[in-house]
Image: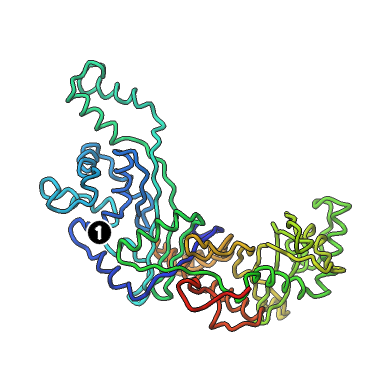
Protein backbone atom coordinates (compact mmCIF):
# COMPACT_ATOMS: atom_id res chain seq x y z
CA UNK A 1 0.00 0.00 0.00
CA UNK A 2 1.28 3.43 -0.93
CA UNK A 3 1.53 6.00 1.88
CA UNK A 4 0.93 3.32 4.50
CA UNK A 5 2.11 -0.03 5.83
CA UNK A 6 2.96 -2.47 3.06
CA UNK A 7 5.58 -4.75 1.55
CA UNK A 8 7.90 -3.90 -1.33
CA UNK A 9 10.25 -5.69 -3.70
CA UNK A 10 13.41 -3.77 -4.62
CA UNK A 11 15.50 -4.47 -7.71
CA UNK A 12 18.19 -2.57 -9.58
CA UNK A 13 17.83 0.03 -12.34
CA UNK A 14 20.84 1.15 -14.35
CA UNK A 15 21.11 4.97 -14.18
CA UNK A 16 22.81 5.03 -17.60
CA UNK A 17 19.57 3.74 -19.18
CA UNK A 18 17.75 6.96 -18.21
CA UNK A 19 18.20 8.65 -21.59
CA UNK A 20 16.82 5.68 -23.49
CA UNK A 21 13.90 5.56 -21.07
CA UNK A 22 13.21 9.28 -21.51
CA UNK A 23 13.39 9.00 -25.32
CA UNK A 24 10.70 6.32 -25.29
CA UNK A 25 8.43 8.84 -23.57
CA UNK A 26 8.96 11.74 -25.95
CA UNK A 27 5.55 13.20 -26.65
CA UNK A 28 4.32 12.40 -30.13
CA UNK A 29 0.78 12.04 -31.45
CA UNK A 30 -0.25 8.64 -30.13
CA UNK A 31 3.06 7.55 -28.59
CA UNK A 32 3.20 3.88 -29.68
CA UNK A 33 5.82 2.83 -27.10
CA UNK A 34 3.66 4.06 -24.23
CA UNK A 35 0.45 2.80 -25.80
CA UNK A 36 1.97 -0.68 -26.17
CA UNK A 37 2.54 -0.95 -22.38
CA UNK A 38 -0.57 1.01 -21.40
CA UNK A 39 -3.38 -0.29 -19.24
CA UNK A 40 -5.78 0.97 -21.92
CA UNK A 41 -4.37 -1.48 -24.45
CA UNK A 42 -4.04 -4.27 -21.89
CA UNK A 43 -7.61 -3.89 -20.65
CA UNK A 44 -9.05 -3.94 -24.17
CA UNK A 45 -7.14 -7.11 -25.05
CA UNK A 46 -8.56 -8.70 -21.91
CA UNK A 47 -12.07 -7.52 -22.77
CA UNK A 48 -12.09 -8.62 -26.42
CA UNK A 49 -9.84 -11.69 -26.25
CA UNK A 50 -10.47 -12.94 -22.68
CA UNK A 51 -6.71 -12.98 -22.01
CA UNK A 52 -4.82 -12.08 -18.85
CA UNK A 53 -2.74 -8.94 -19.49
CA UNK A 54 -0.54 -6.39 -17.73
CA UNK A 55 -0.40 -2.63 -18.36
CA UNK A 56 0.48 0.65 -16.67
CA UNK A 57 -1.47 3.76 -15.72
CA UNK A 58 0.04 7.16 -14.77
CA UNK A 59 0.74 7.67 -11.06
CA UNK A 60 -1.92 10.39 -10.77
CA UNK A 61 -4.61 8.43 -12.67
CA UNK A 62 -4.83 4.88 -11.30
CA UNK A 63 -7.92 4.08 -13.38
CA UNK A 64 -7.37 6.30 -16.40
CA UNK A 65 -8.28 3.53 -18.85
CA UNK A 66 -11.82 3.41 -17.45
CA UNK A 67 -12.52 6.97 -18.59
CA UNK A 68 -12.90 5.67 -22.15
CA UNK A 69 -16.51 4.50 -22.17
CA UNK A 70 -17.73 5.03 -25.75
CA UNK A 71 -18.65 1.50 -27.02
CA UNK A 72 -18.02 2.48 -30.64
CA UNK A 73 -14.48 3.67 -29.90
CA UNK A 74 -13.82 0.64 -27.71
CA UNK A 75 -15.03 -1.62 -30.49
CA UNK A 76 -12.86 0.15 -33.08
CA UNK A 77 -9.74 -0.14 -30.90
CA UNK A 78 -10.53 -3.76 -30.16
CA UNK A 79 -10.49 -4.58 -33.87
CA UNK A 80 -6.90 -3.42 -34.29
CA UNK A 81 -5.71 -5.29 -31.20
CA UNK A 82 -6.11 -8.79 -32.60
CA UNK A 83 -3.37 -11.40 -32.03
CA UNK A 84 -1.82 -10.74 -35.44
CA UNK A 85 -1.63 -7.00 -34.83
CA UNK A 86 -0.63 -6.71 -31.16
CA UNK A 87 1.91 -3.93 -31.87
CA UNK A 88 -0.01 -1.59 -34.19
CA UNK A 89 1.82 0.92 -36.33
CA UNK A 90 0.48 4.21 -37.63
CA UNK A 91 -0.05 2.62 -41.05
CA UNK A 92 -2.23 -0.15 -39.63
CA UNK A 93 -4.73 2.21 -38.02
CA UNK A 94 -7.96 3.29 -39.66
CA UNK A 95 -8.54 6.83 -40.82
CA UNK A 96 -6.11 9.44 -39.45
CA UNK A 97 -4.84 7.05 -36.78
CA UNK A 98 -7.18 5.96 -34.03
CA UNK A 99 -4.47 5.85 -31.35
CA UNK A 100 -3.87 9.57 -31.90
CA UNK A 101 -7.38 10.09 -30.54
CA UNK A 102 -6.74 8.05 -27.38
CA UNK A 103 -4.02 10.14 -25.73
CA UNK A 104 -6.42 11.26 -23.01
CA UNK A 105 -6.98 7.67 -21.91
CA UNK A 106 -3.42 6.49 -21.29
CA UNK A 107 -0.13 8.02 -20.18
CA UNK A 108 1.12 9.37 -23.50
CA UNK A 109 4.19 11.36 -22.38
CA UNK A 110 6.90 11.68 -19.74
CA UNK A 111 4.92 14.17 -17.65
CA UNK A 112 2.35 11.46 -16.91
CA UNK A 113 4.99 9.39 -15.08
CA UNK A 114 7.59 11.85 -13.77
CA UNK A 115 7.22 12.47 -10.04
CA UNK A 116 10.50 14.34 -9.49
CA UNK A 117 9.93 17.97 -8.58
CA UNK A 118 12.83 19.31 -10.64
CA UNK A 119 14.95 18.41 -13.66
CA UNK A 120 17.62 16.79 -11.48
CA UNK A 121 15.17 14.49 -9.68
CA UNK A 122 14.91 11.54 -12.03
CA UNK A 123 12.07 9.82 -10.21
CA UNK A 124 9.14 8.15 -11.97
CA UNK A 125 6.02 6.36 -10.80
CA UNK A 126 3.20 4.33 -12.28
CA UNK A 127 0.50 1.83 -11.42
CA UNK A 128 1.14 -1.73 -12.59
CA UNK A 129 -2.25 -3.26 -13.42
CA UNK A 130 -2.88 -6.99 -13.80
CA UNK A 131 -6.07 -7.83 -15.67
CA UNK A 132 -8.07 -11.01 -15.92
CA UNK A 133 -11.46 -11.73 -17.46
CA UNK A 134 -14.47 -12.47 -15.31
CA UNK A 135 -17.83 -11.22 -16.57
CA UNK A 136 -19.91 -11.10 -13.43
CA UNK A 137 -23.00 -9.95 -15.31
CA UNK A 138 -25.43 -12.09 -17.31
CA UNK A 139 -24.06 -12.00 -20.87
CA UNK A 140 -27.19 -13.48 -22.43
CA UNK A 141 -29.40 -10.80 -20.90
CA UNK A 142 -27.06 -8.07 -22.17
CA UNK A 143 -27.34 -9.46 -25.72
CA UNK A 144 -31.10 -9.75 -25.43
CA UNK A 145 -31.42 -6.16 -24.20
CA UNK A 146 -29.31 -4.79 -27.07
CA UNK A 147 -31.29 -6.82 -29.61
CA UNK A 148 -34.57 -5.45 -28.26
CA UNK A 149 -33.30 -1.87 -28.21
CA UNK A 150 -31.44 -1.72 -31.54
CA UNK A 151 -33.33 -4.18 -33.79
CA UNK A 152 -36.67 -4.67 -31.99
CA UNK A 153 -36.23 -8.47 -32.14
CA UNK A 154 -35.09 -11.17 -29.73
CA UNK A 155 -31.41 -12.05 -30.15
CA UNK A 156 -32.27 -15.48 -31.57
CA UNK A 157 -34.10 -13.87 -34.50
CA UNK A 158 -31.18 -11.67 -35.60
CA UNK A 159 -29.25 -12.45 -38.77
CA UNK A 160 -25.53 -13.20 -38.74
CA UNK A 161 -24.38 -9.61 -39.21
CA UNK A 162 -26.82 -8.26 -36.64
CA UNK A 163 -25.64 -10.83 -34.08
CA UNK A 164 -22.04 -9.91 -34.81
CA UNK A 165 -22.77 -6.25 -34.14
CA UNK A 166 -24.55 -7.00 -30.85
CA UNK A 167 -21.73 -9.34 -29.75
CA UNK A 168 -19.15 -6.59 -30.37
CA UNK A 169 -21.10 -4.12 -28.26
CA UNK A 170 -21.40 -6.66 -25.42
CA UNK A 171 -17.67 -7.35 -25.55
CA UNK A 172 -16.98 -3.63 -25.30
CA UNK A 173 -18.87 -3.56 -21.99
CA UNK A 174 -17.31 -6.72 -20.55
CA UNK A 175 -16.22 -6.62 -16.93
CA UNK A 176 -12.60 -7.41 -16.13
CA UNK A 177 -11.02 -8.07 -12.77
CA UNK A 178 -7.88 -6.20 -11.90
CA UNK A 179 -5.16 -6.00 -9.30
CA UNK A 180 -2.86 -3.02 -9.23
CA UNK A 181 -0.05 -1.65 -7.14
CA UNK A 182 2.32 1.34 -7.26
CA UNK A 183 5.83 1.19 -8.72
CA UNK A 184 8.51 3.81 -7.98
CA UNK A 185 11.59 4.26 -10.16
CA UNK A 186 14.74 5.98 -8.92
CA UNK A 187 17.31 6.55 -11.67
CA UNK A 188 19.62 8.40 -9.25
CA UNK A 189 20.34 5.54 -6.84
CA UNK A 190 19.40 2.94 -9.44
CA UNK A 191 16.46 1.20 -7.74
CA UNK A 192 12.88 0.21 -8.46
CA UNK A 193 10.35 -0.26 -5.65
CA UNK A 194 7.30 -2.39 -6.51
CA UNK A 195 4.56 -2.85 -3.90
CA UNK A 196 4.33 -6.62 -4.35
CA UNK A 197 6.16 -9.72 -3.13
CA UNK A 198 4.89 -11.97 -5.93
CA UNK A 199 7.69 -13.38 -8.12
CA UNK A 200 5.65 -13.34 -11.33
CA UNK A 201 4.39 -9.81 -10.76
CA UNK A 202 7.92 -8.51 -10.14
CA UNK A 203 9.00 -10.15 -13.40
CA UNK A 204 6.23 -8.42 -15.33
CA UNK A 205 7.15 -5.04 -13.84
CA UNK A 206 10.74 -5.56 -14.95
CA UNK A 207 9.51 -6.43 -18.46
CA UNK A 208 7.36 -3.29 -18.65
CA UNK A 209 10.27 -1.08 -17.59
CA UNK A 210 12.62 -2.73 -20.08
CA UNK A 211 10.04 -2.29 -22.85
CA UNK A 212 10.45 1.46 -22.27
CA UNK A 213 14.25 1.36 -22.34
CA UNK A 214 15.06 0.95 -18.65
CA UNK A 215 17.66 -1.69 -17.80
CA UNK A 216 17.03 -3.75 -14.67
CA UNK A 217 19.26 -6.01 -12.59
CA UNK A 218 18.94 -8.14 -9.45
CA UNK A 219 19.49 -6.92 -5.89
CA UNK A 220 19.59 -8.61 -2.49
CA UNK A 221 20.21 -7.76 1.15
CA UNK A 222 23.80 -8.77 1.87
CA UNK A 223 25.17 -8.26 5.38
CA UNK A 224 28.00 -10.83 5.27
CA UNK A 225 25.99 -13.57 7.01
CA UNK A 226 22.75 -15.24 5.92
CA UNK A 227 21.62 -15.21 9.56
CA UNK A 228 21.90 -11.42 9.83
CA UNK A 229 18.17 -10.90 10.64
CA UNK A 230 18.31 -13.02 13.81
CA UNK A 231 21.74 -11.61 14.71
CA UNK A 232 20.37 -8.06 14.54
CA UNK A 233 17.20 -8.95 16.46
CA UNK A 234 19.22 -10.71 19.15
CA UNK A 235 21.54 -7.70 19.46
CA UNK A 236 18.51 -5.55 20.24
CA UNK A 237 17.31 -8.11 22.76
CA UNK A 238 20.68 -8.40 24.49
CA UNK A 239 21.16 -4.62 24.55
CA UNK A 240 17.96 -3.98 26.47
CA UNK A 241 18.90 -2.17 29.70
CA UNK A 242 17.84 -3.39 33.17
CA UNK A 243 15.59 -0.36 33.69
CA UNK A 244 13.42 -1.57 30.78
CA UNK A 245 13.76 -5.26 31.63
CA UNK A 246 12.39 -4.65 35.11
CA UNK A 247 9.23 -2.94 33.87
CA UNK A 248 8.72 -5.46 31.03
CA UNK A 249 9.03 -8.34 33.49
CA UNK A 250 6.51 -6.70 35.82
CA UNK A 251 4.03 -6.18 32.99
CA UNK A 252 4.44 -9.77 31.74
CA UNK A 253 3.80 -11.01 35.28
CA UNK A 254 0.70 -8.83 35.66
CA UNK A 255 -0.75 -10.16 32.42
CA UNK A 256 -0.67 -13.68 33.82
CA UNK A 257 -3.16 -12.54 36.49
CA UNK A 258 -5.11 -9.68 34.91
CA UNK A 259 -6.60 -8.75 31.55
CA UNK A 260 -5.20 -5.82 29.56
CA UNK A 261 -8.15 -3.68 30.64
CA UNK A 262 -7.44 -4.39 34.29
CA UNK A 263 -3.78 -3.41 34.09
CA UNK A 264 -2.96 -0.11 35.84
CA UNK A 265 -0.93 2.02 33.45
CA UNK A 266 2.39 3.50 34.53
CA UNK A 267 2.58 7.19 35.36
CA UNK A 268 5.63 7.47 33.10
CA UNK A 269 3.96 7.68 29.68
CA UNK A 270 7.16 6.94 27.76
CA UNK A 271 7.82 3.80 29.81
CA UNK A 272 4.17 2.77 29.50
CA UNK A 273 4.40 2.95 25.73
CA UNK A 274 7.54 0.82 25.81
CA UNK A 275 6.24 -1.97 28.05
CA UNK A 276 2.84 -2.11 26.34
CA UNK A 277 4.26 -2.30 22.81
CA UNK A 278 7.79 -3.72 22.86
CA UNK A 279 9.58 -6.78 24.24
CA UNK A 280 13.08 -5.39 23.66
CA UNK A 281 14.58 -1.94 23.07
CA UNK A 282 18.13 -0.70 22.84
CA UNK A 283 20.24 2.24 21.76
CA UNK A 284 22.28 1.37 18.68
CA UNK A 285 25.87 2.27 17.88
CA UNK A 286 24.58 5.03 15.59
CA UNK A 287 22.78 6.81 18.44
CA UNK A 288 19.38 5.82 17.15
CA UNK A 289 17.15 3.33 18.95
CA UNK A 290 15.53 0.10 17.81
CA UNK A 291 12.57 -1.61 19.47
CA UNK A 292 10.98 -5.02 18.81
CA UNK A 293 7.26 -5.62 18.75
CA UNK A 294 4.86 -8.31 17.57
CA UNK A 295 3.72 -10.27 15.91
CA UNK A 296 7.00 -12.06 16.48
CA UNK A 297 8.53 -15.52 16.34
CA UNK A 298 10.73 -16.90 19.10
CA UNK A 299 13.03 -19.90 18.71
CA UNK A 300 13.65 -21.80 21.94
CA UNK A 301 16.41 -23.90 20.36
CA UNK A 302 18.43 -23.99 17.19
CA UNK A 303 16.66 -27.11 15.91
CA UNK A 304 13.11 -26.32 17.04
CA UNK A 305 10.37 -24.52 15.12
CA UNK A 306 9.73 -20.91 16.15
CA UNK A 307 6.73 -20.04 18.30
CA UNK A 308 4.51 -17.19 17.11
CA UNK A 309 3.67 -14.50 19.68
CA UNK A 310 1.04 -11.81 19.16
CA UNK A 311 1.91 -9.47 22.00
CA UNK A 312 5.14 -8.22 23.58
CA UNK A 313 4.70 -9.87 26.97
CA UNK A 314 4.37 -13.37 25.47
CA UNK A 315 7.60 -12.84 23.51
CA UNK A 316 9.32 -11.44 26.59
CA UNK A 317 8.31 -14.46 28.67
CA UNK A 318 9.51 -16.93 26.02
CA UNK A 319 12.83 -15.16 25.67
CA UNK A 320 13.30 -15.24 29.42
CA UNK A 321 14.92 -11.83 29.37
CA UNK A 322 15.00 -11.78 33.17
CA UNK A 323 17.18 -14.93 33.13
CA UNK A 324 17.99 -15.67 29.49
CA UNK A 325 17.94 -19.20 28.16
CA UNK A 326 21.07 -20.18 26.24
CA UNK A 327 19.37 -20.99 22.93
CA UNK A 328 16.32 -18.71 23.01
CA UNK A 329 16.41 -16.02 20.30
CA UNK A 330 13.95 -13.84 18.37
CA UNK A 331 13.60 -15.24 14.84
CA UNK A 332 11.20 -12.60 13.49
CA UNK A 333 9.72 -9.31 14.68
CA UNK A 334 8.69 -5.84 13.63
CA UNK A 335 11.60 -3.47 14.21
CA UNK A 336 10.73 0.14 15.02
CA UNK A 337 13.60 2.55 14.40
CA UNK A 338 13.47 5.61 16.64
CA UNK A 339 15.28 8.80 17.48
CA UNK A 340 15.36 10.27 20.97
CA UNK A 341 14.99 14.04 21.07
CA UNK A 342 14.39 16.70 23.69
CA UNK A 343 11.63 19.28 23.96
CA UNK A 344 10.89 22.01 26.45
CA UNK A 345 7.64 22.82 28.22
CA UNK A 346 7.69 25.83 30.51
CA UNK A 347 11.49 25.69 30.44
CA UNK A 348 11.41 22.07 31.62
CA UNK A 349 13.21 19.65 29.32
CA UNK A 350 11.61 16.30 28.56
CA UNK A 351 12.43 13.47 26.17
CA UNK A 352 10.42 12.42 23.14
CA UNK A 353 10.71 9.18 21.20
CA UNK A 354 9.99 9.65 17.50
CA UNK A 355 9.28 6.59 15.37
CA UNK A 356 11.21 7.04 12.12
CA UNK A 357 10.00 3.93 10.30
CA UNK A 358 9.32 0.27 10.92
CA UNK A 359 9.76 -2.99 9.02
CA UNK A 360 9.37 -6.71 9.53
CA UNK A 361 12.64 -8.61 9.84
CA UNK A 362 12.80 -12.40 9.42
CA UNK A 363 14.76 -15.03 7.52
CA UNK A 364 12.92 -14.39 4.23
CA UNK A 365 14.39 -11.02 3.28
CA UNK A 366 15.17 -11.76 -0.37
CA UNK A 367 12.95 -12.80 -3.27
CA UNK A 368 15.65 -14.77 -5.03
CA UNK A 369 13.55 -16.12 -7.92
CA UNK A 370 12.71 -12.55 -8.90
CA UNK A 371 16.12 -11.05 -8.15
CA UNK A 372 14.71 -8.64 -5.60
CA UNK A 373 15.27 -7.61 -1.99
CA UNK A 374 12.19 -7.44 0.24
CA UNK A 375 11.09 -4.59 2.46
CA UNK A 376 8.28 -6.23 4.40
CA UNK A 377 5.74 -4.47 6.58
CA UNK A 378 7.40 -1.13 5.82
CA UNK A 379 5.76 1.94 7.30
CA UNK A 380 6.59 5.59 7.98
CA UNK A 381 4.24 6.52 10.86
CA UNK A 382 4.84 10.26 10.59
CA UNK A 383 4.31 10.51 6.82
CA UNK A 384 0.71 11.77 6.93
CA UNK A 385 1.48 14.24 9.69
CA UNK A 386 4.44 15.65 7.75
CA UNK A 387 2.37 16.06 4.58
CA UNK A 388 -0.54 17.69 6.42
CA UNK A 389 1.94 20.11 7.98
CA UNK A 390 3.16 21.07 4.49
CA UNK A 391 -0.41 21.65 3.34
CA UNK A 392 -1.12 23.81 6.38
CA UNK A 393 2.05 25.86 5.88
CA UNK A 394 1.49 26.38 2.14
CA UNK A 395 -2.27 26.91 2.60
CA UNK A 396 -2.90 24.96 -0.59
CA UNK A 397 -3.30 21.39 -1.76
CA UNK A 398 -0.18 19.57 -2.91
CA UNK A 399 0.05 18.00 -6.37
CA UNK A 400 -0.25 14.21 -6.40
CA UNK A 401 3.34 14.01 -7.68
CA UNK A 402 4.49 15.58 -4.40
CA UNK A 403 3.00 12.73 -2.37
CA UNK A 404 4.76 10.12 -4.51
CA UNK A 405 8.03 12.07 -4.52
CA UNK A 406 7.98 12.50 -0.74
CA UNK A 407 7.21 8.84 -0.11
CA UNK A 408 10.09 7.78 -2.37
CA UNK A 409 12.48 10.08 -0.52
CA UNK A 410 11.27 8.72 2.83
CA UNK A 411 11.86 5.18 1.59
CA UNK A 412 15.34 6.07 0.34
CA UNK A 413 16.19 7.68 3.67
CA UNK A 414 14.83 4.73 5.66
CA UNK A 415 16.94 2.26 3.68
CA UNK A 416 20.06 4.36 4.26
CA UNK A 417 19.35 4.38 8.03
CA UNK A 418 18.62 0.65 8.01
CA UNK A 419 21.92 -0.14 6.29
CA UNK A 420 23.79 2.21 8.61
CA UNK A 421 22.28 0.68 11.75
CA UNK A 422 22.69 -2.90 10.54
CA UNK A 423 26.35 -2.55 9.54
CA UNK A 424 27.27 -0.69 12.72
CA UNK A 425 25.51 -3.23 14.93
CA UNK A 426 27.06 -6.23 13.15
CA UNK A 427 30.39 -4.39 12.90
CA UNK A 428 30.87 -4.92 9.16
CA UNK A 429 32.01 -2.64 6.34
CA UNK A 430 29.23 -0.26 5.37
CA UNK A 431 30.64 0.19 1.87
CA UNK A 432 30.90 -3.53 1.16
CA UNK A 433 27.47 -4.59 2.41
CA UNK A 434 23.87 -3.50 2.25
CA UNK A 435 21.65 -3.57 -0.82
CA UNK A 436 23.90 -5.27 -3.36
CA UNK A 437 23.84 -7.19 -6.62
CA UNK A 438 23.28 -10.90 -6.44
CA UNK A 439 26.41 -13.02 -6.29
CA UNK A 440 25.71 -14.31 -9.80
CA UNK A 441 25.82 -10.75 -11.11
CA UNK A 442 28.65 -9.48 -8.95
CA UNK A 443 31.99 -10.52 -7.53
CA UNK A 444 30.63 -10.01 -4.01
CA UNK A 445 29.74 -13.12 -2.05
CA UNK A 446 27.69 -13.83 1.04
CA UNK A 447 29.44 -15.94 3.66
CA UNK A 448 27.56 -18.37 5.86
**Front-most of residues 131 and 386:** 131
- Image-based side of 386 in relation to 36, left or right: right
When asked about the image quadrant of residue 273, the answer is bottom right
When asked about the image quadrant of residue 81, the answer is top left
- Which residue is at the far left? 95
Quarter of the image with the C terminus is bottom right
* Residue 324 drawn at (x, y percent): 84, 69
Q: Dot 1 lies on which element? A: helix
Residue drawn where x is 50% and y is 74% of the image: 436
Q: Which residue is mark 1?
A: 33
- Image-based side of 184 in relation to 281, left or right: left
Colour style of the rendered protein structure: rainbow
Residue drawn where x is 64% and y is 63% of the image: 362
* Residue 24 drawn at (x, y percent): 25, 65
- Image-based side of 284 in relation to 406, left or right: right
Please, is residue 70 above or below residue 101 in the view? above
Residue drawn where x is 51% and y is 64% of the image: 388
* Residue 105 drawn at (x, y percent): 28, 50
**Front-most of residues 40 and 210:** 210
* Residue 401 drawn at (x, y percent): 39, 64
Please, is residue 33 above or below residue 94 in the view? below
**Front-most of residues 151 and 208:** 208
Amino acid sequence: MLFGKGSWSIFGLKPESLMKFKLSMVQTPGNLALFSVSQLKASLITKFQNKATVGINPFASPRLDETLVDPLVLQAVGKILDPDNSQPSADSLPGKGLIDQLVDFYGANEAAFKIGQDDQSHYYGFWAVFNDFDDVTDVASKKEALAYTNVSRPYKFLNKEEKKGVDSFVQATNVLTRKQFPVLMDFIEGRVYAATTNVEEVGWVQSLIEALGGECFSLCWNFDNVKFPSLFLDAIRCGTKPVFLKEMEARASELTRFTKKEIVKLDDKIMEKIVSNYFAITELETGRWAALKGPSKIKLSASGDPITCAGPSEAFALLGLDSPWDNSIPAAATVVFQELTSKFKKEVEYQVRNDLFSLVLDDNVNLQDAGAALLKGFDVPGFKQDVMRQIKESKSELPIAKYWDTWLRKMRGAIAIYIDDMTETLKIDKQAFGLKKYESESEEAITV
